Amino acid sequence: MATQEVLLSVDKLVKHFPIMRGVVIQRQVGAVHAVDGVSFDIVKGETLGLVGESGCGKSTTGRAILQLYRPTSGAVLFEGVDLVKQKGEKLRQMRRRMQMIFQDPYASLNPRMTVGQIISEPLIIHDISKGKEAQEKAEDLLKLVGLNPAYTNRYPHEFSGGQRQRIGVARALALEPALIVCDEPISALDVSIQAQVVNLLEDLQSQLGLTYLFIAHDLSMVRHISDRVAVMYLGKVVELATRNDLYSQPLHPYTQALLSAVPIPDPVVESKRKRIILTGDVPSPINPPSGCRFRTRCPLAADICKEKEPEWREALSNHWVACHMV
């Protein structure tokens, strides 16, 4: 991390999806609590990893930050501007500074457009360049992500998954953003290709001074790319620390259980290690448990966990956790 200047500050971010009933007269009968009071900062030039199991709200958090989903409440300060309060043209101008790399390289590229059109589309929409100039810029971006510039006239179906994800990266870079939200950019790729894409993201970060929010399942990959890691469970961040602190000294019982599932490539260490097997299923985000959300599966749960929500506090230096038992 080059500087300690905060680029993005997320404060008590909430996103609930209403559940509607009725055909003619619709009424709200409940809500899916996808994201419920998430707070963190991202410093310029760093990578913050966001991990957690499927359905915990990681992708929704990323989309709510970029205002692809408008948050229910909370604040998202990007370069000092609250994006939640921006609308229309002002928000459109801010979008140039923030981009997203989507999870599925097969679904996120328009099959009816050539690669050159896909990459140059943001340039044309934001009135930066047109025609031959936009085409040349697309060729330069293809070269930057390690693809042949002559591929601009090809269509997405002519590429492999890893190549498509590189095209997605090139499109995200077209407007020279400061922040890129990487929404599980490697989960749909072969293991052999995953490392190539992650190395590409790291190279681009050092070349262009990018800042990443890296959403992922793969804990070993997150350890490789991230400076700090936030752990999410059922719509809430339960632990946030530097990469080394989190992996060497996890404080929250959920983080400990997650990390115990990561294989270690040393048979001696692996044989002595104790797996933490969580009982039960993840509760429904429509009706989350009272108090601590993890208490229904936590081996340390006590009465206070049922009654009172744990406060978000700094348990160690730069190591934040939400747990009564820590």
Image (spheres, grey):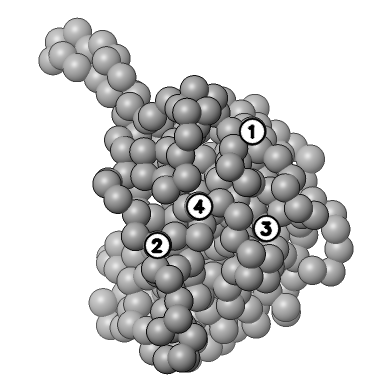
Upstream in sequence: badge 3 or badge 4: 3
Which residue is disc 4 drawn over? 253
Q: How far apart are marks 2 and 1 (CA)?
A: 24 Å
Q: How far apart are marks 3 and 4 (CA)?
A: 15 Å
| Near-viewer residue (248 or 19) | 248
The disc label shown at residue 311, or none: 1
Q: Is mark 4 on a helix, strand or loop?
A: helix
Q: How far apart are marks 3 and 2 (CA)?
A: 21 Å
Among the 4 quarters of the image, the one containing residue 153? bottom left
Which residue is disc 2 drawn over? 276
Which residue is disc 3 drawn over? 241
Q: Few, some or many C-alpha atoms within 10 Å of disc 4 (few <14, some 14-19, many ≥20)?
A: many
The amino acid type found where label 3 is placed reads: Ala
Is residue 314 left or right of 246 when viewed as pictured?
Answer: right
Q: Residue drawn 30% across and 35% down?
A: 284
Q: How far apart are marks 1 and 3 (CA)?
A: 16 Å
The amino acid type found where label 1 is placed reads: Glu
Q: Few, some or many C-alpha atoms within 10 Å of disc 1 (few <14, some 14-19, many ≥20)?
A: few
Is residue 81 left or right of 112 when viewed as pictured?
Answer: right
Is residue 325 left or right of 294 when viewed as pictured?
Answer: right
Q: Position of residue 108 (x, y in %)?
A: 36, 61
Upstream in sequence: badge 3 or badge 2: 3
Q: In this view, does 246 lie above or below 77?
A: below
Q: Position of residue 320 (x, y in %)?
A: 68, 48
